Image (cartoon, grey):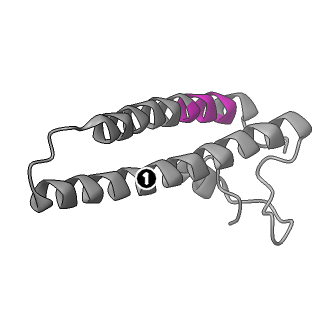
Amino acid sequence: MADLNLDYFKKRLIEERERILKNIREVSDELATIAAEDEIDDIEDLAELKIENDRDKEILRILMLELKDVNDALKKIAVGRYGIDEESGKKIPINRLLANPAARTA
């Protein structure tokens, strides 16, 4: 898309990818810490660890989806398909891309 500043969006997407990767590392470290927890004194401790573990797994799942979207957007920039709605084939409005550079649809 000639009217988009692709360098700007590429930079934003790369920064977003780095932020997501940092968060993935932090959540993964937390999951490893929870898994290594050996001071479970009672059922309440066990329940709390399960809740934390489930929460972190869901956060990790969401982060992985976000990472895929960002990587897909970077691939679209590389092949000249960035900013095109995946469903309609029309241009995604610039305001939508500014709000979410990895947007797949308008």
In the depicted structure, whether residue 75 falls above or below residue 92: above
Location of residue 105 (image quadrant): bottom right
Residue at 14% in and 39% down:
39
Q: Nearer the viewer, residue 14 or 33?
A: 33
Q: From the image, which quarter does the N terminus lie in?
A: top right
Q: Residue at x 20, y 61 (%)?
A: 47
Task: Kindly indicate the quadrant of the structure image that contains residue 15.
Answer: top right
Which segment did they paint magenta?
9-17
The amino acid type found where label 1 is placed reads Lys
Where residue 54 appears, as percent x and y from the top left, is 36, 58
Q: Residue at x 86, y 47 (%)?
A: 81
- Asked whether 47 or 18 is in front, the reply is 47
Q: Is residue 56 above or below residue 88?
A: above
> Hey, which residue is sitting farthest right in the picture?
79
Residue 3 lies in the magenta stretch: no
Residue 10 pos. (x, y %): 68, 31
